[in-house]
Image (cartoon, helix red, strand yellow):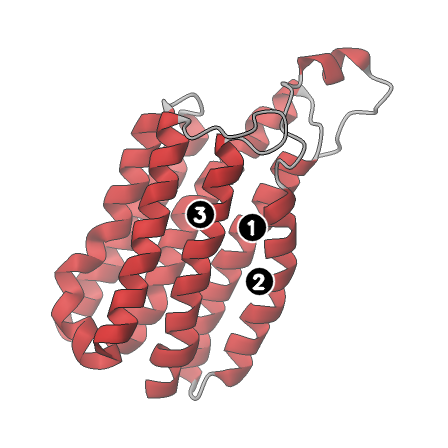
Amino acid sequence: MASPSASDPVAVQREPLKPRLRGVSHEYAFFVSLLAGAALILAAPSARAALAATVYALSLSALFGVSALYHGVTWSVPGRRWMRRLDHSMIFLLIAGTYTPFGLLALSGTLAVVVLAVVWSGALAGMALNLIWIDAPKWFSAIVYTSLGWVAVVALPQLVSYIGSTATGLLALGGVLYSAGAAVYGLRRPNPVPAVFGYHEVFHALVIAAAAAQYAVIAFYLLPRS
């Protein structure tokens, strides 16, 4: 969807004032994710691992790419609402995309099937909810994201057995950072420099840190064992 012209005063006036760094971190993260995702796929030791890496890499780049586009463009009011829907939906896509390598490679048997079914069903339901209920309260969205993200606790024994305690701890650290980001998003605090780097930028920074931690687990612990 095309953004409004800078000469369209009505569209520009309706766009809420944003911190100057809004979306900048995710612009950089998007380009890094393309390279990192490609490296992950090329390093996959098997077809199954390559499939898992591809799903994860696409979900990671989709999240950062849509976020950068949504926050970096001055949209018309209808355009902004649709992009917000897509932006929030990508969070659910990344949750499911991150679970996929672990479900396909680290878990086995019924547990693998159940975890992937629950997470992907929940993610698709969450994406549908975001497309329908765009004005859902931030705190509600934060609770839903966090709840779905911690489904992995039921698979903890198998995860530790397959990737080890260090990698599982790093995976959990990513979850904690994501949860902290969700809390910042829901509470809108801290809001350090509202005109430049506000609460949303803190949220974005925590998402990047969390994604980096979990990428490291997949790249250096999960795939080499697959």
The reply, left or right, for residue 12 in relation to residue 165 is right
The reply to whether discs 1 and 3 touch (Cβ–Cβ < 8 Å) is no
Q: Residue most toward the right?
A: 7
The reply to whether discs 2 and 1 touch (Cβ–Cβ < 8 Å) is yes
Residue 87 x %, y %? 52, 39
Q: Earlier in the sequence, mark 3 or mark 2?
A: 2
Between 4 and 176, the one nearer to me in the picture: 176
Q: Which mark is residue 158?
A: none
The residue to which callout 2 is attached is 33
Between the C-alphas of marks 3 and 2, the distance is 16 Å
The residue to which callout 3 is attached is 206
Residue pictured at 22% horizontal, 80% vertical: 162
Between 142 and 124, the one nearer to me in the picture: 142
**What's under tag 1, amino acid-wise?**
Phe
The quadrant of the picture occupied by the N terminus is top right
Residue 124 x %, y %? 35, 45
Residue 27 vs 182, above or below: the answer is below
**What's under tag 2, amino acid-wise?**
Ser
Between the C-alphas of marks 2 and 1, the distance is 8 Å
Q: Secondary structure at mark 3?
A: helix
**What's under tag 3, amino acid-wise?**
Leu
Residue 162 vs 81, above or below: the answer is below
